[in-house]
Amino acid sequence: GENVEQHPSTLSVQEGDSAVIKCTYSDSASNYFPWYKQELGKGPQLIIDIRSNVGEKKDQRIAVTLNKTAKHFSLHITETQPEDSAVYFCAATLGGSYIPTFGRGTSLIVHP
Amino acid sequence: ETGVTQSPTHLIKTRGQQVTLRCSSQSGHNTVSWYQQALGQGPQFIFQYYREEENGRGNFPPRFSGLQFPNYSSELNVNALELDDSALYLCASSSASQGTDTEAFFGQGTRLTVV
């Protein structure tokens, strides 16, 4: 089955800095890669996603890149703010049915 | 708000008991997936229901079972509870049609504690 590795497990940045979270996946048949933000006591919230026919996608301060050859994808957050502090999860999904495999999460801490 | 609601929000059960967790999916979504999230871990896929039929199952024993109703709401049942079943249980709804899928939207979860 699919295996998703996520790094780093913890990321501490100063407000205004950029943050990058990286994930690798094992199954080349995976074709949908969502990113989720989970705040304390809440369920994961989809923040951005990318499909395998696209190399990069941007939404305001958030961007995701995908390298299908290397089987890795990354989340980039620019101009970080304290409210960006949360746990971020990447996931990889095989086509046909939405059954994602999640990474173990990255705890992002943005210091004011 | 995602439109996915779960009940109850918190629950304490004794080892060996049975529990039922409930999920109302987002309007227009026909697929419900359940996940177990242990503390400090990513969500682990339990199973998925599509139009009232089980449509995929993760590595969980048969004492984890589920149902999906005609209105696409869903239940997760766990029998013979074990201490390791203590976790946040998440429900996610999505819409599947002819092999394509929309993104999944998660509920806030049910925190189950087994003592």
Image (cartoon, coloured by chain):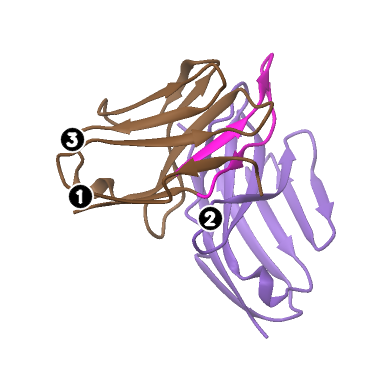
Chain colours: A purple, B brown
Q: Are marks 3 and 2 in contact (CB under 8 Å)?
A: no
Question: Could you tell whether A61 is left or right of A35 in the image?
Answer: right
Real-space Cα separation, disc 1 to disc 3, in angstroms: 10 Å
> What's the mark number on residue B80?
3
Disc marking residue B83: 1
On screen, residue A106 versus residue A111, left or right, reads: left
Disc 1 and disc 3 on one polypeptide chain: yes
Q: Pointers 1 and 3 in contact (CB under 8 A)?
A: no
Residue toward you, A98 or B31: B31
Query: In front: mark 3 or mark 2?
Result: 3
Quarter location, residue B99? top right
The reply to whether residue B59 is in sight is no
Q: Where is residue A87? Give x, y as percent.
A: 55, 62
Q: Mark 2 points at which residue?
A: A6
Residue A4 is situated, as x and y percent measured from the top left of the image, at 51, 45
SS of the residue at dot 3?
loop
Q: Alpha-carbon neighbours of circle 3 within 10 Å: few (<14), some, or many (≥20)?
A: few
Q: What residue type is labelled 1?
A: Leu
Q: Chain ID for label 1?
A: B
B69 vs A95, nearest the viewer = B69
Residue visible at 68% across and 40% down in the picture: A69
Residue toward you, A39 or A79: A39
What's the magenta region?
B90-108
Q: What element carries label 1?
A: helix
Q: What element carries label 2?
A: strand
Residue A95 seen in render: yes
Work out whether residue B50 or residue A7 is closer to the camera in this orientation and state it.
B50
Relative image position of residue B68 (x, y in whole percent): 47, 21
What chain letter is assigned to the residue under label 2?
Answer: A
